[in-house]
Image: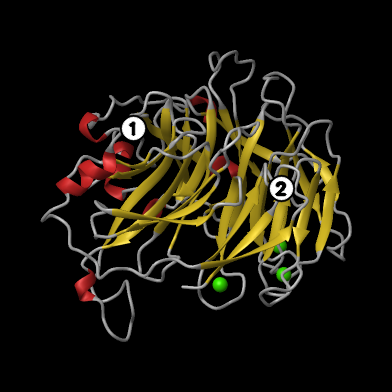
């Protein structure tokens, strides 16, 4: 997310002298939504983008010396995944090796990193049969600095029930984390719990942000606005967690991103109506003092596509690559960065899109419209070139149709304005429901973890670049 964009829009909020919104600043309920007009729709670029973009990409961009092709070796660490709703990456047992966590339909499991490629990943059940419906999401992060992650999950998944479905659990680890964990169910949550992430608030504090699919009681994506909650872990995690609850102004939301670049503390939520940006302010957050925590929703940007956005991530491209220095590698020596957001559109859609907020071309660039239910997205420097690539996973139809394409691809910018991109399909065997990036073998190269829905696999793609 471009910081100018954010500052511009934050500036439009009526602030009091202490920097908080002027109306009832301590009540999250009062947060007012500000709607923005549609961005100009680059119709010429809309659906046959690559050819058009290639023609347009002439003098404006600086060509990067051809980045290497991504190369991976696949290793399935589980071939009995039921659905593989959510993947998380964290060190579960504190041995400094990054482990893998999976929210599968009926179980929450973790897979212990054996410390080398090709070895078996022992698996342990954290919890199972927590609710009558499936688990749907997981968030794992070391929020207290002891080197071992804290884990929360979403369950009771039934998107057709916008009144009573949905559940959030915090899982208290036993001393031996290979044993079952103690589930603590939150007493009341927004229905249709769907995605969650730990969000850093201030220097040391973390909140658990939970986004439902629908607004409470909604029918056909209409009715009450979807509310996102940020929960704060009390000293005794079995007691009720304080929740900051915010209306998003949207009515069918699918996922959110926590990376707002320089502004750090915030969320970008995507759904049927486009994307909304929420800034969470905690400048005066010396101890856990919830009263000083506020949030602002500066703007909703309507989706340029007609049916919304289901995934979003943020990345940067390295500009002025000629200034690379020999010793410091990439990203230093006066280089600047170009921020972009990447999305899957529409909901579970066929298009991979990149948004830029500067440069000579319209800011919406469709990289492909050939995904079959795009469902997973990440940005990271797989290639070690100093800027990010886009990693996208698609799962095929649900239920599967004969001949469906499934898999993952890496999209690499071939110039520093992100005008020309190269697709490399890296997997055709994983009906990708979710994915995450981490260097799992410590060789300094980001590996990919992908969960396959119809293909029932949990796969590591080891980076062999
Ligand atoms: Ca570990
Ligand atoms: Ca911890
Ligand atoms: Ca690696």
Q: Nearer the viewer, residue 118 or 263?
A: 118
- Residue 13: mark: 1
Q: Nearer the viewer, residue 4 or 288?
A: 4
Whether residue 5 is visible: yes
User: Where does the image place residue 241, in percent across and percent down from the top left?
Assistant: 72, 41
Asked whether residue 236 is in view, the answer is: no
Q: How far apart are the two marked residues, 1 and 2, measured between alpha carbons?
A: 47 Å
Q: Earlier in the sequence, mark 1 or mark 2?
A: 1
Looking at this rendering, what residue extends furthest in the front direction?
403
Extreme residue in the left direction: 59
Residue bearing mark 2: 456
Q: Is residue 205 above or below residue 105?
A: below
Position in image of residue 395 (x %, y %): 58, 41
Query: Image height check: is 460 above or below 261?
Result: below
Identify the residue at image location x=33%, y=29%.
Answer: 304
Location of residue 97 with respect to 389 vertically, above or below:
below
Residue 399 is marked as: none
Q: Quadrant of ligand 1?
A: bottom right
x%, y% of residue 137? 67, 42
Q: Secondary structure at mark 1?
A: loop
| Quadrant of the image occupied by residue 403 | top right
Q: Is residue 70 left or right of residue 435?
A: left
Label 1 crowd bin: few (<14), some (14–19), many (20+), radius 10 Å: some
Residue at point 63%, 32% (across, down): 398
Q: Residues within 10 Å of mark 2 (few under 14, many from 20)?
A: some
**Closer to the camera: disc 1 or disc 2?**
2
Question: At 75% across and 54% down in the image, what residue appears?
Answer: 79
Q: Position of residue 397 (x, y in %)?
A: 58, 33
Of all residues, the one furthest to the bottom in this rendering is 327
Placement of 90 over or under 236, stated as above or below: below
């Amino acid at each position: 997310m471009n910081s100018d964009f954010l500052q511009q829009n934050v500036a439009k909020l009526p602030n009091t002298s202490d920097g908080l919104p002027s109306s009832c600043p301590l009540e999250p309920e009062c947060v007012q939504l500000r709607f923005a007009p549609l961005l100009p729709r680059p119709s010429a670029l809309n659906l046959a983008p690559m050819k058009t973009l290639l023609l347009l990409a002439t003098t404006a961009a600086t060509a990067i010396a051809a980045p290497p092709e991504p190369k991976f070796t696949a290793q399935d660490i589980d071939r009995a995944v039921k659905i593989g709703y959510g993947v998380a990456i964290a060190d579960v047992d504190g041995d400094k090796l990054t482990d893998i966590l999976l929210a599968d339909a009926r179980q929450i499991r973790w897979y212990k990193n054996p410390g080398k490629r090709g070895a078996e990943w022992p698996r342990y059940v954290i919890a199972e049969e927590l609710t009558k419906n499936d688990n749907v999401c997981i968030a794992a992060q070391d929020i207290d600095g002891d080197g071992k992650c804290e884990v929360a999950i979403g369950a009771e998944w039934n998107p057709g029930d916008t009144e009573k479905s949905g559940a959030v659990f915090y899982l208290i680890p036993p001393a031996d984390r290979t044993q079952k964990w103690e589930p603590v169910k939150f007493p009341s949550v927004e229905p249709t719990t769907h995605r969650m992430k730990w969000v850093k608030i201030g220097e040391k504090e973390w909140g658990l942000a939970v986004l439902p699919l629908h607004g409470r009681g909604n029918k056909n994506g209409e009715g009450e606005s979807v509310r996102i909650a940020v929960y704060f872990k009390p000293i005794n995690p079995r007691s009720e967690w304080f929740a900051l609850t915010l209306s998003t102004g949207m009515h069918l939301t699918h996922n959110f991103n926590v990376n707002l670049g320089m502004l750090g503390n915030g969320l970008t939520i995507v759904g049927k109506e486009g994307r909304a940006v929420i800034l969470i302010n905690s400048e005066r957050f010396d101890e856990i003092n919830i009263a000083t925590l506020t949030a602002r929703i500066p703007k909703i940007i309507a989706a340029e596509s007609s049916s919304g956005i289901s995934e979003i991530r943020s990345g940067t491209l390295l500009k002025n690559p000629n200034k690379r220095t020999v010793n410091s590698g990439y990203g230093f020596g006066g280089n600047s960065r170009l921020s972009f957001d990447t999305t899957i559109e529409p909901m579970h859609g066929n298009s991979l899109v990149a948004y830029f907020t500067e440069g000579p071309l319209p800011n919406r660039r469709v990289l492909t419209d050939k995904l079959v239910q795009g469902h997973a997205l990440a940005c990271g420097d797989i290639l070690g070139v100093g800027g990010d690539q886009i990693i996208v996973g698609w799962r095929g139809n649900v239920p599967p149709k004969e001949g469906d394409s499934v898999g993952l691809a890496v999209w690499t910018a071939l110039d520093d304005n992100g005008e020309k991109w190269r697709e490399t399909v890296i997997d055709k065997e994983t009906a990708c429901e979710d994915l995450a990036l981490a260097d799992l073998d410590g060789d300094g190269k980001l590996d990919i973890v992908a969960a396959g829905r119809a293909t029932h696999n949990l796969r590591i793609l080891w980076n062999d670049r």
